[in-house]
Image (spheres, helix red, strand yellow):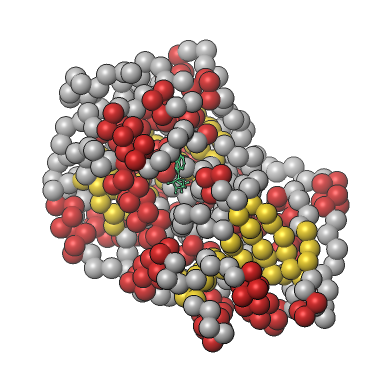
Amino acid sequence: MRFEALGLSEPLLKAVADQGYDEPSPIQTKGIPLVLEGEDVMAAAQTGTGKTAAFTLPILEYLSTQPKVRANHAKVLVLAPTRELAAQINESVKTYSKYLQTTSAVVFGGVKINPQMMALRKGVDILVATPGRLLDLYNQNAVKFSDIEVLILDEADRMLDMGFIHDIKRVISYLPKERQTLMFSATFSDDIRNLAKGLLKRPVEISVTPRNAAATTVEQFIYSVDKKQKPALLAYLIKKHDWKQVLVFSRTKHGANRLAKFLNGREIQASAIHGNKSQGARTRALAEFKSGECRILVATDIAARGLDIDQLPQVVNIDLPHVPEDYVHRIGRTGRAGMTGQAISLVCADEVKQLFAIERLINKEFDRKIHDSFAPVNELPPSDISRYSSRKKKPKKPKAPKDFDTSESPSQNSRRPRRTPKSATTDKPRSNSNKDKEIKSEENAPKQRKKRYFRPKKTGSYKPS
Ligand code: AMP
């Protein structure tokens, strides 16, 4: 499949070619035609699969045919969990829209609000935001939501993990009901599915990786080592293998600081990135790491979420995450877009529970290594994955679907009837939202685009390819 076959126009194809992309990734092949058709989409896609372009390209295609945005309004809202991810999405939007007239802005907390207010004054086609700052701006009338046509929730699972559910619900209660909604999540937990029920209307589900699987191009193994020996083992491995760029995950902010200090003490340049650092320090640390100025970036899960670093070869878990899904997110930093990578975890006996939970999640026992000079006093008990698979799961009680309380926005309480999506009136099978069904890319070859149901087109130049 080529990008030309997806129904994108020349300026976008040119921008994509400038990036050196030969062909669309699976999430792009599946997602772009659906988004162009105005469908609500729920996509299970790991970070690194090209999901940002999967939603950005068709949205830009649509926007390129639309009239200018009104002052202090936006047409497309992208919600992201972290400042870094939001900034990265906006960079991608700028990259792909370089031959178009569409405008975008990014807003997030931790920096001054005034420049963001100024940026919104003329209105922007695409607004990328973290939920808290977006609400601040909304409450100060710096942005109005009445023209929002598309809502995109990126890394929705992480937004829930980070406790953004109330902010998200609040933002959604202010948005027009008639809109297209796209939701991207690395994994589809029950909480995510419940969120989706209140948000998306008859979504088409797409999935590009098996649930909770890691990219196959990532080599994964563990070192069994005592806790207090971990920093020394890491320093040894960095020097021995002459690793040039390593993203190290620490469970805690203090742990990240301590490790960065330890490595610097051994003449290995390292910075820490976490929620207690100022936005300036986080941006600087990331830029230095990306440019190769700084060799080691020690990050907490939240700060590292969604970071896109080209060709990152090495990820190290100095400790294992409490939530096993975080392991998959962490190692998703390497082996991106088909590149090879190595993910190494330093595991002590205290972490055996987390280790087994991860092995159960990814359905794989890790290869284990012990370095003679760092042999653990407390050894890890052996894994036995067959034990997990034979264990019967307790059946879950089905939960009643919850709808959002939209009472905060009285003007929007009366639902306008929504135009029936094209797929509902044809024989085209839709995924049942309770099943993680994968739809085949052939089914999604670009067809005659249906008109968006939320807003009649004002220009006649939007031609199907
Ligand atoms: P994402 O999953 O959106 O974070 O994207 C991961 C990386 O894949 C980014 O560095 C993109 O520039 C890159 N990428 C996106 N689409 C393609 C493509 N079709 N071919 C090659 N690389 C891509």
Question: Front-most of 423 and 251?
Answer: 251
Q: Position of residue 357 (x, y in %)?
A: 73, 58
Counting the numbered discs, the total is 0
The residue shown at (66%, 81%) is 232
**Residue 278 is drawn in which quadrant?**
bottom left
The residue located at (46%, 57%) in the rendering is: 309
Find residue 289 and report its horizontal and vertical position in percent: 44, 67
Task: Relative to 357, say whether 436 is above or below.
Answer: above
On screen, residue 407 versus residue 258, left or right, reads: left
In this picture, residue 53 sits left or right of residue 95: right
Residue 201 in view of the camera: no
Foreground of the two, 111 or 369: 369
Residue 252 x, y percent position in the rendering: 56, 74
User: Above or below — where is 356 with respect to 435?
Assistant: below
**For residue 57, above or below residue 245:** above
Up the image or down, 235 lies above or below 362; here it is below
Q: Quadrant of ligand 1?
A: top left
- Name the quarter where the C terminus is drawn: top left
In the image, taking residue 153 as reference, residue 232 lies left or right, namely: right
Q: What residue is at 46 percent from the left and 20 percent from the top?
A: 445
Q: Position of residue 174 (x, y in %)?
A: 30, 46
The residue sitting at 76% across, 57% down in the picture is 366
Q: Quadrant of residue 434?
A: top right
Front-lying residue, 461 or 69: 461
Q: Nearer the viewer, residue 96 or 164?
A: 96
The answer to whether any part of residue 355 appears in the image is yes
